[in-house]
Image: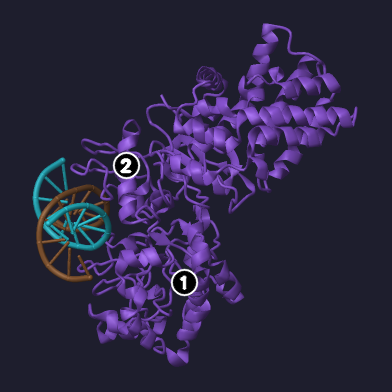
Chain colours: A purple, B cyan, C brown
Amino acid sequence: MDTPQKSVAQIGTPVSKLKVEDSPVFNYICSLSPIKTIKSIPITQTLSSLNFTSPPSVFTSPHAVSHKESRFRSQKDGSASKEVASIGEEGNEEALVEMEQVQSHKNDCNTPRVINDVRDNGCCEDSGKDLQKMLDNVKKKSDTPDWETLISATTELIYGSPRESEAFSCLLKRTSNSEARLSGGTMPTSKPVSNTDVGNYESESVDALSILHRGVRRRCLDFEIPGNNQQTYGESSSSCVVPSIGLHLNAVASSKDNSVANEYSGNIKVGLQSSATPVLPSPHEILIENETGKDAGQIIEVVPKSLALVELTPISPKKKRQSEQSGEGESSCKRCNCKKSKCLKLYCECFAAGVYCIEPCSCIDCFNKPIHEDVVLATRKQIESRNPLAFAPKVIRNSDSIIEVGEDASKTPASARHKRGCNCKKSNCLKKYCECYQGGVGCSINCRCEGCKNAFGRKDGSLFEQDEENETSGKSGTTKTQQNVELFNPAAQPSTPMPIRQPLAQLPLSSNNRLQPPQSHFHHGAIGSSSSGIYNIRKPDMSLLSHSRIETITEDIDDDMSENLIHSPIANINSLSPNSKRVSLAHLDSSESSPWRRTGGRNLIRSFPTFPSLTPHH
DNA sequence: GAGTTTGAAACT
DNA sequence: CAGTTTCAAACTC
């Protein structure tokens, strides 16, 4: 079986046995100095602080490669799925079992997963050699080595990333503490002497090892969104991240999965997006309340938020719908009901989302399972060859939508747009048939919808006052001619507000941040003037971020930055000047036939930033 | 839960 | 690229 545990064994020889006291580093440390246990704490802190830095370049993972090989996030049949929650709840016993499994897989390096992990962590052999060199150098340089430096360096050498070294440091710390207890506060100069001690030690260090495991497993759960550090609260526990061949994870990033705890029972799993440039590099403690309340408030994971893939036990489909209706559903887990597609087409929500189908799915003849990984990968490749962004997030949000948690979900987002736009004919973009509406975003000029009444922003882009005018003047399906920059129309709020917990595409719109007037941020509550409206549309996005993942579609950044700048909100503002409400109509109209509009959805996606601009300018 | 509607995805 | 078919989610009853 291809389990993430394998990767643990690949991390590096010094720790591969998972008994730190057996590692050369540990032995060396022990032999050199009677470190007081108290010292380990600052060491750990030091290493923690390293989390904010990039991994040493020498051991920087070839993400691009490993991502290609990345795989579904977890397997319901066992492998990676028993992760964080079990660590918290079942505790040490399982961790020990995992350790054994790791041992048993130690030499199994045949799978891509393992290969990736080896890559990600740097070659274990090389690491070991380098480590030895380093140790030798330190020995030569001074009889009183700089312990923090040494440990920091060695751990990073071993793990290739500060995060992992942190785990190792934690392990060391625990070890240190544990042994300190055993030895009356003095660092022992040898391994624990008795089996009992070993057992205690192992028990004591299980948590640290668990952290270590998690660090490793996260790699296994790597999803290869280039530069995409998605925080996927709400992916179903068994919705396993599909090894992305190309680009983005739709679902992890897509609109349906950002809610956090309220919808899930306690089985929480955390994956990690491997990335050298976390969007939110600081570690966060993710507090997730168990459904039973049993572990309420328990700290499930401490992980850089932007890198976490939190998988939670999915709720029942019924619950899902209920929660969706109640405004939580956007973030609910994916589960499909495919009957003919074998869950190998984009019809399948799971597949489209880049996750494996799971038990709650009601699919028939499903191939979207880990055991058919090859098929899944091949199919994905095929689909992506057809449309490279097929698995990209459908809804793309501006990056400046920093939000307050718990913000009223009814305050809709409009800074985000469906990347390709909808094509609704009958639903008036007022039902979830409409992908824009479903995504909680307004329609845009990308949309070819008819009779758009999207409550989150209509394609015609009526301003707030204008919107009413348009309402009264009768807005037909032929709104294309009056396309404008659509804005969120508060009056058009659905009676049952859409959940706005959308993933936020953190786009190169940092430029937006720069260009946008400050009041555009956190402009709460003030809806009414067109001038403020343009900012108001960002507010909902902020709420979106409350639990959202951050997506950075880095592949688009370089090429599209200039366009993003062009399409910055400033441009919108100008075009929406009260004195020239329709001033952009020419552009808009022309946008209908503009190159990037005319190219049609897919071409547009291919040639245009994955997030459509709010403005038709080009 | 079954049937219908809808629009995206896939196909031609 | 447009038209058609297939598909599964959303919706209704």
Q: Is residue A515 visible?
A: yes
Q: Mark 1 sits on what residue? A: A537
Q: Is residue A544 visible?
A: no
Label 2 close to label 1 by CB (< 8 Å): no
- Tell me the quadrant of the picture where the N terminus of chain A can be found: top left
Vertical comparison of A503 with A294: above or below:
below
Element type where label 1 sits in the image? loop
Q: Position of residue A555 (x, y in %)?
A: 49, 58
Q: In this rendering, would A552 be left or right of A477? A: right
Q: Is residue A503 left or right of residue A25?
A: left
Residue shown at the point (44%, 66%) measured from the top left? A609
Could you say which is closer to the camera, residue A444 or residue A430? A444
Hey, which quadrant is residue A387 in on the image?
Answer: bottom left
**Disc on res. A378:** 2
Residue that appears at 37% across and 69% down: A442
**Which of pointers 2 and 1 indicates the residue nearer the eye?**
2
Of the numbered discs 2 and 1, the one sitting upstream in the chain is 2
Where is the C terminus of chain A found, in terms of image quarters?
bottom left
Residue closest to the eye, A600 or A359: A600
Which of these two is toward me, A117 or A540? A117
Distance from Cα at disc 2 to Cα at disc 1: 40 Å
Residue type beneath disc 2: Ala
Q: Chain of mark 1?
A: A
Which disc is residue A393 wearing? none
